[in-house]
Every structure is written in C-alpha cells, then in structure tokens.
Amino acid sequence: MARMLHAAARIVSLQDGMALVRLDAPAACGSCGAQGACGGARARLFRVAVATGVGAGDRVLLQLPEKNLNRSALLAYLLPAATMLLGALLLAVGGDTLAALGAALGLGLGLICLRIFGRRSVDSGIRACHPNSTQGASP
C-alpha cells in the first residue's frame, strides 16, 4: 500500500462536486521562531474534489500519496534547471553573451512549463475523506 500524507481541513463551501477547503495550520506552528518566513502558520484555501455526503463546515482529512509529492518536487526543481542548461548549451556556440541569453530563455521556458503542468501533478492525487474513515473517498 502506498504511503499517504495527511492533513486536517474544514470545508468552507461546495460547488459542483468541488470543495473549497481551509487547511489548518499545524499545532506546532504557534511556537516556531520562523513564523514570518514560513507559510505553514497561515490557513490556506484551495479546491479539492470530494465525495458526496459532506457539507460546508464539515471537517475532512486530506490525503496525498507520498509519490505524488516526490514527483512534484522533482519536477519543480529539475525542469527549470534542465531547460536552463539546455538553453545555455544550445546558444553557447555563439559566445558567452548568447549562452547567458539562452540560459535565461531556457529558465523562462522551464518556469512556464512548470506553471502549466506542475499544478495538475499535485492536485490530481488529493483525496478528501471523513476523519474517521480508514479507506477515504475517491473524488
């Protein structure tokens, strides 16, 4: 069985099988000295597919397969770096100035691709279920 990451959330609203959920900040965030630098202490809102039988105000448990998070982290770090290096290598034959321009263009292309494909990579695996459910509800 795949390892799952869990987080508690509360449904703010429902619309067309999608829920706007507020992810609770972890309890340890209140005593951390890095509160200003870390985004973990703030409540975050995002949309997730939910099963029927839940309503606004209900508490749910969000589940994400660990492999999805790992895949997304690799994509976020490696794609921009790879496209930057590729851009620099392709234009390096024209000199240092063109190589730097190629690196900048490659980095920009990598960030655009990451914006397009990256969000789908993480969001596709998130499931919301009742906290006392062991199986979870597939969206």
Image: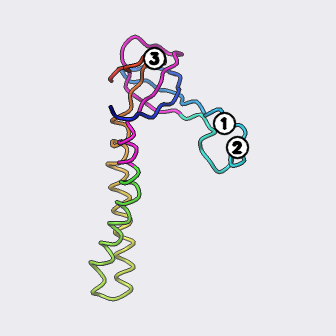
- Of 94 and 60, nearer the camera is 60
Q: Is residue 79 magenta?
A: no
Counting residues from the start of the chain, the first of labels 2 and 3 encountered is: 2
Q: Which amino acid, mark 2?
A: Cys
Write the residue at 37% across / 62% down.
Answer: 80
| Residue tagged 2 | 32
Residue placed most toward the observer, 17 or 6: 6
Going by the picture, which residue comes out furthest to the bottom?
A: 95
Question: Is mark 2 in CB contact (under 8 Å) with mark 3?
Answer: no
Q: Are marks 2 and 1 in contact (CB under 8 Å)?
A: yes
Residue labelled with disc 1:
28
Image quadrant in which the C terminus is located: top left
Q: Position of residue 73 (x, y in %)?
A: 41, 51
Q: Which stretch is magenta? A: 45-72
Question: Badge 3 is on which residue?
Answer: 130
- Give the x, y percent position of residue 134: 41, 19
75 above or below 50? below
